[in-house]
């Protein structure tokens, strides 16, 4: 959420999340805490942004959708989602053609059961990866791009970017710990 003071009018609140989560439900009698800080300056091209640039280029080269390409890369080079250290398997009715176009969940088709339902392995979204996991995803993506003749960064540029990603993740983890201590 962004808060902006407009002289003579008060505060303007801007929520940075998409509906339906952008609805703020105020419960009468409950206390709320509002934290105000200056916006952070944008970073240079990060490893995550670079990954998405490469996904875009690769999807165009392969003539498939951005989402299908990203899901294929994540399910090939990414990290399986686990619950209590057990890989998450998802059973549902939608066919693989539908699931590969889903942005909110990254899956890889496993099989179709006797009941006609489809089974999928679920993968973590790239924003959840640590630096080692993200490095593996990015290196696999770069390899796929090179196979298609797509220009990529030099190893030195990539190393610099991955170090920046690691710093960013460490900062986010530190901020999360600080915020949980304050709660």
Image (cartoon, grey):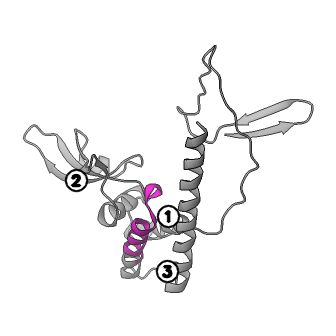
Residue placed under numbered mark 1 in the picture: 52
Screen quadrant of the N terminus: top right
Whichever of labels 1 and 3 marks the residue nearer the N terminus, that label is 1
Note whether 126 is above or below 167 in the view shown.
Answer: above
Secondary structure at numbered mark 3: loop
Q: CA distance from mark 1 to mark 3?
A: 13 Å
- State the image coordinates of residue 28 (x, y, percent, origin top left): 63, 14
Image-based side of 10 in relation to 149, left or right: right
Q: Are marks 2 and 1 in contact (CB under 8 Å)?
A: no
| x and y, in percent, of residue 181 in the image | 57, 42
Which residue position holds label 3?
Answer: 152
- Is 6 placed left or right of 40 in the picture? right
Residue plotted at (74% across, 41% down): 36
- Residue 109 numbered mark, or none: 2
> To which quarter of the image does residue 144 belong?
bottom left
91 inside magenta stretch: no
Farthest residue in the top direction? 28
| Residue lying at 50% horizontally and 64% vertically, measured from the top left | 52
């Amino acid at each position: 959420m962004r808060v902006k003071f407009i002289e003579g009018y008060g505060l303007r609140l801007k929520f940075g999340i998409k509906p339906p989560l952008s609805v703020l439900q105020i419960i009468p009698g409950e206390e709320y805490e509002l934290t105000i800080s200056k916006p952070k300056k944008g970073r240079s091209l990060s490893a995550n942004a670079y990954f998405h640039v490469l996904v875009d280029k690769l999807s165009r080269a392969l003539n498939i959708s951005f989402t299908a390409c990203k899901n294929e890369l994540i399910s090939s080079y990414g990290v399986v989602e686990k619950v209590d250290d057990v890989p998450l398997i998802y059973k549902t009715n939608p066919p693989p053609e539908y699931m590969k176009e889903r942005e909110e969940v990254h899956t890889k088709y496993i099989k179709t059961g006797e009941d006609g339902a489809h089974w999928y392995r679920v993968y973590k979204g790239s924003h959840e990866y640590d630096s080692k996991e993200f490095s593996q995803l990015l290196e696999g993506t770069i390899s796929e791009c090179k196979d298609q003749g797509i220009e990529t960064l030099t190893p030195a540029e990539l190393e610099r970017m991955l170090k920046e990603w690691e710093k960013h993740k460490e900062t986010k983890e530190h901020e999360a710990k600080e915020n949980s201590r304050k709660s």
